[in-house]
Image (cartoon, rainbow, N blue to C red):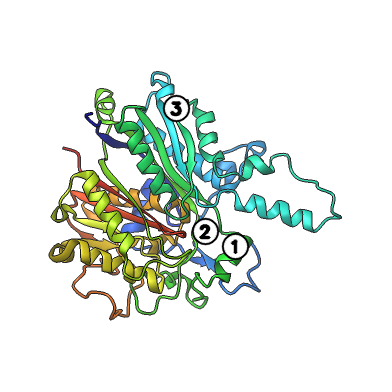
Amino acid sequence: MQLKRVVVTGLGALTPIGNNIKEYWEGLVNGKSGSAPVTYYDTEKFKTKFACELKGYKPEDFFDRKEARKLDRFSQYAIVSSDEAISDSKLDLDVVDKFRVGVVWGAGIGGLETFQNEVMNFAAGDGTPRFNPFFIPKMIADIAPGNISIKHGFMGPNYTTVSACASSANAMIDALNYIRLGYCDVIVTGGSEAAVTIAGMGGFGAMHALSTRNDSPETASRPFDATRDGFVLGEGAGALVLEEYEHAKARGAKIYAELVGGGLSSDAYHMTAPHPDGIGVVKVMQNCLNDAGLKIDEIDAINTHGTSTPLGDVAELKAISEIFGEHAPNININSTKSMTGHLLGAAGAIEAIASILAMENSMVPPTINHSVVDENIDPKLNLTLNKAQKREVNVAMSNTFGFGGHNACVVFKKIS
């Protein structure tokens, strides 16, 4: 069976460093930090008092008051980013066969704020179960793609992938396969997350996963730096319109890149810690390269998972050195989480978008906040430290890993 080619024809982003694609890219290349003191709740008794919140986002700019009340923030973010991507793609929604348009979305947690607030309100009451009738439909992780499809009438495959921080990368790989096997012409894919909440920050804080650099939140996310002490929680969404190549070409669509492959693997090691030797990470990149039919010397850039955790960063870079060998120093390696923080289930989507924009603009965004060399990291690797680097990027890879040992990897190529 001849697999169909799959291309990217639309992009949308809602991030801590920019509320649309243009702003997001400007934030990336300028090394903008999205980390700042939390504004959503009183952090006095929390160990970590900062996060990468959205800046200037107002629900009323996109939804009427009644509609907004029915949507958890993670669903709002999904709708806003997907609307931008659909508009960017210039799909004619009056002409396209909506039975062949799907939505495959990623979310690691879903409506955490909704769940938190409903349970806290119940606990503060007299025991009478007075719950909002929208509690369940606001909270469930699958509601984001449901809302996107309802808004636009898309009647193809519609569901959410949940694999912790690998969720939206998993969603992209599923979408890739549906299109290249011929089941769909177009799929809106990506991910959203809104876990900067009392429960989210408290839970990750209890695990000692978060940075506690409260004296300098803007520099707290410092992947690959010897003084890193944990990740910075972020929120937002990223959306991509994936389309069958001939379908896109026939309507004269702008094509950003071709999604040529995806890989999956599992660490099978620990609930939260990565395998110290990066065995699963080696396998996921090998699987991705094999799926794409690429050689190791064809990779120009890798947007790493790079969360700024002591164990994870080293394990991932060891795996890159092992796979790419002598070619590894020729690759621009970076972590855009140094700017956006960790968007959990949305991370794969916004980082894939960063990789695509790097290709389009011949510019690799930096890994900011690096000042102290980690002796456990190969000094020959180009980690794109502190300043964006200009270079031609023809093939870009993006890694995303999640609690539970989930590993996902996608690779994009300039269209030819």
Disc number for residue 156: 3
**At numbered mark 1, what does the secondary structure look like: helix, strand or loop?**
loop
Question: Does residue 49 appear anywhere in the picture?
Answer: no
Label 1 to label 2: alpha-carbon separation? 8 Å
| Label 2: element kind | loop
Which residue occupies the extreme right position in the image?
126
In the foreground, 132 or 165: 165
Of mark 1 and mark 2, the one earlier in the sequence is 1
CA–CA distance in space, label 2 to label 3: 33 Å
Amino acid beneath label 3: Gly
Label 3: which secondary element? loop
Q: Is residue 287 in view from this perspective? A: yes
Tag 1 residue: 39
Q: Nearer the viewer, residue 62 or 315?
A: 315
In the image, taking residue 331 as reference, residue 303 lies left or right, namely: right
Residue at position x 28%, y 67% in the image = 317
Q: Quick check: marks 1 and 2 in contact, CB under 8 Å?
A: yes
Q: Amino acid at mark 2?
A: Glu
In the rendered view, tell whether residue 228 sits above or below residue 88: below
| Percent position of residue 388, x then y | 26, 62
Residue highlighted by disc 2:
53
Q: Earlier in the sequence, mark 2 or mark 3?
A: 2
